[in-house]
Amino acid sequence: MERARERSAARETEHPTAQVTEAEPELELLVHGVGGTTPEKMLGDPRTVRITGDDTAAVFRRSDHTADAPAGQGPHSEPVQEAYVWCNLTSGDGSRALWLLLLPFMVVNLAHWMRPAASGRGRTVRFYGLLVRLAALTLTVLLVAAACEVALDLVAWQCAGVSACAQRHSWLGFLSPTVSSDGWWSLPGRRLALAASVPAALTALLWYLSHRTWSAYESHRPMSRDPEPETDDDALARPGFWYGRRLVARLRAAHTAAGLLTVAAAVLTPAARFDHRSGGPAALDALGWILAAALLGCAAAVVGVVCRRGRSENRLDQQLDRHLVRRLPLGALGLLLLTVLYAGWSRPGWRSAGRLPGDPAFGALMLAQGLLVVVLAVVAHDLYRRRPDPRAGMRGLGGPAVALLACALGGVMSGGVAQRVADWLDGTRALLDGPPVLLTWQASAIPPILAVLLAVVAHLALRTARLARAERDRVRDEHPGEAEDPSRTRAIAQARAMATLTDRAPLVVAVLAATTLLIGAAALAGAQATGEPPEGAARRTYAAVQAVAETSQTLGSWLVGVGFVLFVTWARRAYRDASARRTVGILWDVGTFWPRAAHPFAPPCYAERAVPDLTWRMATWTRHTGGRLVLSGHSQGSVLAAAAAWQLTPSVRKRVALLTYGSPLERLYGRWFPAHFGPRALAALHGDVACWRNLHRRTDPIGGPVRLPGDCGPEVDHQPLKDPLDYGRTPRQPLPAPILGHSDYQADPAFARERARLLARLRPDLPGQRPVPGVPE
């Protein structure tokens, strides 16, 4: 610290013009990207000190820069550096491994934020959000219905009702009428009532995880400030954008109630069917009708809660609908208990046979999801044509495509669990009827979908190979006069070609979504029309059709089994191994940036903690010191940096410069989330902050230019950085320079140069601004 003061004093002596005005303190606030890192690596010093925050997310400094202003003063010295480390928000303790089970919920939540940009279309935008919330609700019902299929149908109804199956699994003996000699628990209704505890416990676990993660993430309130004039291009600047407590609580209550009602319906249906037969007990028959009406009424209330209210972003909404949040789940729980008592009543002559009536339920869910996705696509297209953006992914249909893939992922996971449990209970497939036919059709749809996906991958591989060959000539032209190394040229060209695959993601998603929709519709029609699995439905057709059906069914079942084993294995490894958990955390880094606007059981939004952290730090530092601040974000950190800059007050924004590198702001977020990171939104951000510079490389598969329209583009985007820094061996680089791609942007001399220029632009009235010593222009 003292050496820094001495260097500053020496410069002032050599250049007296610099003493015309007193220099202000300078700060560079570093924000890392996906995968996380350590403060020691970010700051380049093993001696770091946490100056604010906790074990989950914190700001660090070098130990010799523990004060706010003493170092980094003046335009000719390095600014003080602080590192904001947020990686533990997504890859902390072992419980993060359980988030793998919430993958479909996370994907459908992304669909909410992928709507096209719209101006003056408030009702259509709200209708879009409503459709996504309804699709999310069907996923909760699907997950709980799959748990009911396993616990109630396969275990309690089928296996416990067949003496041979119950004898193979001795732990089911007390539920079997034969093994237990008609014991108290052997009645079908009581078996169902006991098995209902499994899906009910799953629903309770989802509620607990959502509530617990809310306390850790979304309970951190942003800074209170007056709302600015509202526009459609700066939604992330609204005061309440990063505080979704009220909506998450409402949706959590509704989804919890929906899960409990699904369990109650699964218990009620077989008992009510038995009571409705001719000659059945009149009292139980009437009670069954009353309970069915109550379940329908409560289900209508759940749908009403989901439809009634979306996000409130224009202000910091701190209210909570306490009566609704408490009474709706408790009412559903009360109905479940009454249903369990009703089903457990003694009914002479009632025996379990065949399957529980699950086919219509799964078919209705799949049909509802398909219709919601189709209507969502119509609404998204209507929004897109009002303000077309050629860079938007899939021409505005990215949200419906992702919602469809979320539903397909939920169906595959549900069917996979059911089939694996059925194989475990009845390995010979001769004792039990097995899961509903529709789940078998869904598993059989996996091989043709994978075949189409492999064809797309092969097409992209050929295209990348052709592009790599073309890039070799460009690499040679960029290094005239240097001796060519063919292997070096191929490596650079291959890195550039591989980096372009990110821009082909819309093609992959579009083909995958279209194929899933068509084959899923065919599977639903086949299951409903034949009532048999694909192999049985194709018996009376051509031999080629039979072979395809048998192969798809067998291969689909095998693929589901392998996928289920890999899923469980990876989740277990992630629970025990911190490095594997960090790898899983990369998925959450990208998928959980957005608030839980559609599904309350999705993994929590880490930005609702990180953005207020950054905003508070920048606002308090500038207010305390009056200094200049460079907000420096790499990769996903640049997205957090942009979101935090939007949340600052206008006076603070004008004291902040934005430096982004390896940034997916336009390449990924601008294309897939055009309503919030589209061209107009990024142009508005450029106008709000004091200045902005973006660094990128052609070898970077994630980062890219911001591509602002008009004169703003060259002002923000630096020319693509050289990568590698030197083609061959040089006195400065006696060993071959590595191809950096997405990493280590600070190693490029352009980084320090552009940072110094940003700091200089923050105070244009300072006289005699000179380049940083030792840094080339």
Image: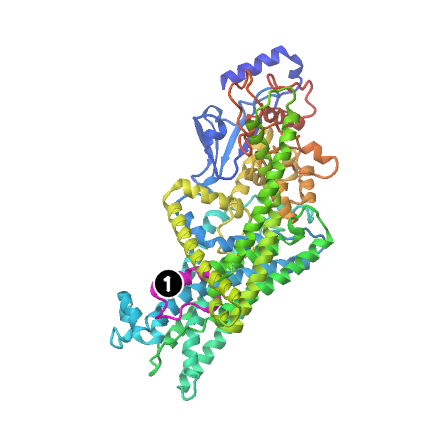
Q: Where does residue 633 sit, x and y in percent of width and height?
A: 57, 35
Tag 1 residue: 423
Residue farthest toward the front in the current orientation of the protein: 543
Q: Residue at x 41, y 86 (%)?
A: 282
* Residue 209 found in image quarter: bottom left
Q: Nearer the viewer, residue 283 or 648?
A: 283
Q: Which residues are magenta?
A: 413-438
Q: Does residue 337 appear to the left or right of 108 in the view shown?
A: left
Query: Taking 489 as reference, is 674 above or below it?
Result: below
Element carrying mark 1 = helix
Residue farthest toward the bottom in the current orientation of the protein: 279
Q: Residue at x 43, y 61 (%)?
A: 203
Residue 1 visible in this rendered orientation of the protein: yes
Q: Does residue 424 appear to the left or right of 300 in the view shown?
A: left
Q: Does residue 616 appear to the left or right of 234 in the view shown?
A: left
Residue farthest toward the top in the current orientation of the protein: 14
Disc 1 residue type? Answer: Asp
Q: Where does residue 69 sit, x and y in percent of width and height?
A: 54, 25
* Residue 260 found in image quarter: bottom left
